[in-house]
Image (cartoon, grey):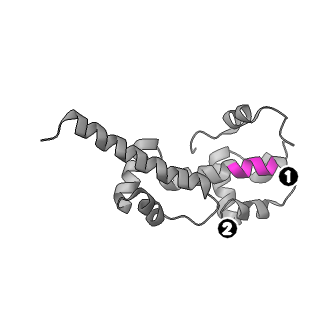
């Protein structure tokens, strides 16, 4: 019979596994990551990983990874003068069309329109991250 202590440990273990997978996405966002590899990091099956990740963080692993890549692209677009294609490839997208569509879905405008706002203002990094972070899709 399960007691509250066992349930608490199981939830804590699950949260730790999901955090480990999310940390992997944060560190290696530009690399080709798939659900199978992330599920192995969390030591769970692929289907269980997708369900649990969504229940824990409120979005699927795929959406989280796309948002993470777009966040990095947002910073690069306004802080350097490399081409949109170079930035697209640097943040982990393999197709400029997919990058532009995903960027528009998350930010609400094209990468070029976002870049035309000009360089980022000099503010503390924590403020800039909080101000510029897209909260969700749509």
Q: From the image, tell me which residue sits under label 2.
A: 95
Q: Quadrant of the N terminus?
A: top left
Q: Secondary structure at mark 1?
A: loop
On screen, residue 98 above or below 14: below
Q: Left or right: where does residue 50 sit relative to residue 64?
A: left
Q: Residue at x 86, y 42 (%)?
A: 119
Q: Quadrant of residue 33?
A: bottom right
Which numbered disc flags the more N-terminal residue, 1 or 2?
Answer: 1
Q: Left or right: where does residue 130 sit relative to residue 45?
A: right
User: Callout 1: few (<14), some (14-19), or many (20+) C-alpha neighbours within 10 Å?
Assistant: few
Q: Residue at x 65, y 61 (%)?
A: 30
Q: CA distance from mark 1 to mark 2?
A: 21 Å
Magenta: main secondary structure equals helix
Q: Secondary structure at mark 2?
A: loop
Q: Residue at x 42, y 63 (%)?
A: 40
Residue 20 rendering spot, x and y as whole percentages: 48, 51
Q: 38 or 118, which is in the foreground?
A: 38
User: Callout 2: few (<14), some (14-19), or many (20+) C-alpha neighbours within 10 Å?
Assistant: few
The reply to whether residue 40 is visible in this rendering is yes
Q: Left or right: where does residue 62 sit relative to residue 49?
A: right
Q: From the image, tell me which residue sits under label 1.
A: 80
Q: Which residues are magenta?
A: 72-78
Residue 111 rendering spot, x and y as whole percentages: 76, 52
Q: Residue at x 66, y 63 (%)?
A: 93
Residue 44 rendering spot, x and y as whole percentages: 35, 59
Q: Is residue 47 part of the magenta span, yes or no?
A: no
Residue 72 rendering spot, x and y as whole percentages: 70, 50
Q: Outermost residue, left direction? A: 1
Q: Quadrant of residue 117?
A: top right
Circles 1 and 2, Cβ within 8 Å, touching? The answer is: no
């Amino acid at each position: 019979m399960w007691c509250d202590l066992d349930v608490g440990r199981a939830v804590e273990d699950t949260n730790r596994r999901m955090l480990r997978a999310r940390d992997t996405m944060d560190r290696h966002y530009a690399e080709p990551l798939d659900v199978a590899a992330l599920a192995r990091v969390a030591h769970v099956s692929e289907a269980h990983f997708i369900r649990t990740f969504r229940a824990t963080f409120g979005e699927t692993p795929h959406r989280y990874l796309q948002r993470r890549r777009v966040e990095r692209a947002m910073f690069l677009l306004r802080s350097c003068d490399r081409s949109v294609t170079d930035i697209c490839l640097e943040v982990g997208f393999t197709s400029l069309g997919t990058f532009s569509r995903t960027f528009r879905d998350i930010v609400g405008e094209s990468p070029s329109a976002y870049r035309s706002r000009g360089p980022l203002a000099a503010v503390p990094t924590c403020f800039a991250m909080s101000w510029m972070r897209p909260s969700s899709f749509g």
